[in-house]
Image (cartoon, coloured by chain):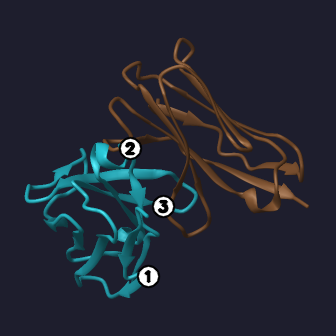
Amino acid sequence: GAVVSQHPSWVICKSGTSVKIECRSLDFQATTMFWYRQFPKQSLMLMATSNEGSKATYEQGVEKDKFLINHASLTLSTLTVTSAHPEDSSFYICSASAGTSLGNEQFFGPGTRLTVL
Amino acid sequence: QKEVEQDPGPLSVPEGAIVSLNCTYSNSAFQYFMWYRQYSRKGPELLMYTYSSGNKEDGRFTAQVDKSSKYISLFIRDSQPSDSATYLCAMSAQTAGNKLTFGGGTRVLVKP
C-alpha cells in the first residue's frame, strides 16, 4: 500500500514550452502533497506544499508563477513548469501524506526527469 | 551554514561490514528524524522513522538520535551490495508528514 506514481517518468522539451507533471496517490487519499527538485548528486529541495483545494505554499526563492501547482483532488497534484528553460532541467519528485491515518509518513513518487533543450 | 549537514561520501565498504552514517543539525525544533534510501534516478524510500532521542532497530538497520548533541546516526549491519545507494537523513519539527529538511545525502558503495 501507500503507492505514489508520477507521470511522465522523463520528458524532454524545447526552451519556452510548458511541461505538466502529474503526481497521484494510488491507494490512499493524500491530504498534503509536496513537490521537490533534485539536482545531480544533490539533495532534495522542497519547492512547495499543497493541500487539496487550497493554494500551494511555496518555499522562499521558488517562483510561483513559473512553477504552477494544482491539487485538485485528494489523489492528484500537478506541477506545471511554465516557459521552461535549460536551467529548469532537474529531477522533480513529489510526495504525499495522509496524516495520522498512515502514520504521518510522506510517501515519495519515483520522480520525473525534465530536460529542457 | 546548512540546517542539516551530511558527509557526501562516497563511503566504500566490503560486503558484510557495518555501514555507519550520520548527520548533524542546527535547528533544535526538529523532533522527527528519518532516514531514506535513494537508488539512482528513483524516489526516496523510507528506512527508519524516529521521534526524539533514543535508538530504534529494524532488522539490519539501527537509528540513533542524540538531540543534546544534535546528531543522528544510521547503522547498517551485514551490508550487502544491494545496499549500495545514496542515504538521506531528513528532519521535521512536526511529523514526517509535514515539511522535511533533508541532508545532502551520503553515497554508499558495498563491494562484493
Q: Position of residue A17 (x, y in %)?
A: 23, 84
Instruction: Identify the residue position indicated by label 1 in the image.
Output: A10
Badge nearest the viewer, 2 or 3: 2
User: Rounded to the nearest whole Å, what is the CA distance between mark 2 and mark 3?
Assistant: 29 Å
Label 2 with label 3: CB-CB less than 8 Å = no
Q: Which badge, 1 or 3, comes first in the chain's sequence?
A: 1
Secondary element at tag 3 = loop
| Mark 2 or mark 3: whose residue is earlier in sequence | 3
- Residue A43 is situated, as x and y percent measured from the top left of the image, at 50, 51
Which chain is represented by cyan in the image?
A
Q: Is residue B72 left or right of residue A61?
A: right
User: Given this view, does label 2 or label 1 mark the residue nearer the observer?
Assistant: 2
Q: Is residue B48 above or below residue B33?
A: below
* Residue that mark 3 sits on: A39
Query: Which residue position holds label 2?
Result: A103
What chain does mark 2 sit on? A
Other-residue count near label 2 (Cα within 10 Å), few / some / many at <14 / 14–19 / ≥20: few
Asked if residue B83 lies left or right of residue A38, the reply is right
Whole-angstrom CA distance, mark 2 to mark 1, is 30 Å
Amino acid type for the residue under numbered disc 1 = Trp
Residue pictured at 18% horizontal, 65% vertical = A69
Name the chain letter of the residue that bears numbered label 1.
A
**Chain ID of residue with mark 3:** A
